Amino acid sequence: MDVDCRALRDCLERLAAYHANLLADLVRLNSVVGQEKLVQTRVLSELQRLGLDVDVVHSRDDDQSMNLAARIPGKDGRRYRSLVLNAHADTAAVDAPPSWSHAPLAADIKDGRLYGRGSQDDKAGIVTILLALAAMQEIGLELGGDLVIHCVIEEETSGNGTRAVLARGYGGDGVIICDGTWPERAIYAHLGQASFRITIDGEAVAASNVRRTSHPFDRAVELVSALKERLAALHSGRGPFEGIDPPFFVNVGALHGGIWCGSVPAALTMDIQIGFAPPLDVAQVEAEVTAITRSIAGAAAEPWLLKREPFRADPANRLIAELIEVVRRGRGKDLTVQPVTGHTDMPFFSTPDICLHGPGGGAGAHGVDEYYILSHMPDVAQDLVLLSASWCWRDKA
Ligand SMILES: [Zn+2]
């Protein structure tokens, strides 16, 4: 269906201030993994304000577990292709707030940047989809196929949010995950990831007797270097994965243990995340990490939270081809199609027509002073509207 690009752009600009405020509201509601209900309740009310019939789907057995899914029926959903727009509400942990120059949950806006944990990753993704939906309604856009909306949790960990809404029947012929990337990029591939909680026993003796015992920290260092060596060996001779070189990493994300400098810690806990490339999969990486950890005295590894297989879609798939076309037509820009080292929810979808796009630029995702560039939101929302207007009028198959 043809869209009057000028009218659409005017409409998006008119709605932009409301959606910048909405993004600030969402950033002020902490939604670190396990505490997502407040923000999801707010998103639910926004979806209902737009008249959507929203299904609340649980992915965990606790009172915070809340995923949102809705299907907006097209004119003929059996004939025309459907499109899924997916974003996530859970955020990375807020690490060491004093090191931030803007309080992580204050949602300060300065020089067109909205600061705060989850601003770019991925509350801007949620709000960009809401902006696109509001604009489609205002310009009276009719679609042939269904539009399916996901606002999920647990993207940063198990992926169970997206899995739960898909199991409830909210799939589609094409998928855009609006998460953590710049307006002129589409992401088609990523490394696999798995995380582990490792415990290492120590002997709680006085510091002055440290030479008589095996310090758990020394064994932690030994273990991390053994893991790095093993990963390098497992990937050796295979070359880069989709240009990612080296296609693996080991991150020690947290290290806990001990009570003071005068004693050897009775135990250390180490949380690690590992990235890897195919043909390795999560099960193999778990087996390798378990075996290497067993070879270190007093150490044990427990697979924990994150399990994501490596993923590669065809970078020339039908959805990416159509997205390249609408970005060129709507904004006169060329889209770069690239891989990322991080993980996404793409592996859970069955359609080959999939990528990440939007919600726009920024920095500090999972780090300090995360921010989102607000001026990117109308650009990406415009892409989503134009893509829906063309993709959802194409015949299935
Ligand atoms: Zn994300």
Image: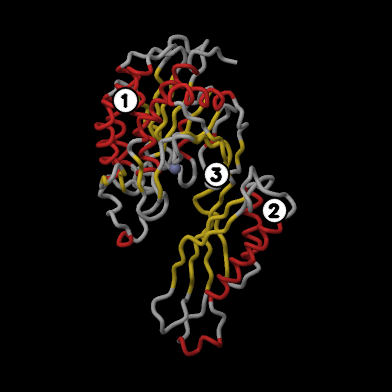
Residue 235 - label: 2
Instruction: Please name the residue that numbered disc 1 is placed on.
Output: 12
Which residue is most to the right?
Answer: 237
From the viewer's side, name the closer residue of 175 and 195: 175
Q: What residue appears at the point 43 percent right and 39 percent down from the top-left corner?
A: 59
Q: What residue appears at the point 44 percent right and 71 percent down from the top-left corner?
A: 257
Number of marks present in the image shown: 3
The numbered mark, 1 or 3, whose residue comes first in the sequence reads 1
Mark 1 in CB contact with mark 3 (< 8 angstroms): no
Work out how far the residue at label 2 is from the one at label 3, CA to CA, in angstroms.
Answer: 17 Å
Which residue is most to the front?
Answer: 332
The numbered mark, 1 or 2, whose residue comes first in the sequence reads 1
Instruction: Please name the residue that numbered disc 3 is placed on.
Output: 340
Q: Residues within 10 Å of mark 1 (few under 14, many from 20)?
A: many
Q: Position of residue 321 (x, y in %)?
A: 56, 25
Q: What amino acid is labelled 1 in the image? A: Leu
Q: Is residue 277 left or right of residue 56?
A: right
Query: Which-is-in-front pick, marks 1 and 2?
Result: 1
Q: Position of residue 74 (x, y in %)?
A: 43, 13
Q: Residues within 10 Å of mark 2 (few under 14, many from 20)?
A: some
Q: Mark 1: which secondary structure?
A: helix
Q: What residue appears at the point 35 percent right and 23 percent down from the top-left corner?
A: 133
Classify residue 231 by image quadrant: bottom right
Q: What amino acid is labelled 3 in the image? A: Val
Asked if residue 163 can be seen in this view, the reply is no
Q: What amino acid is labelled 2 in the image? A: His
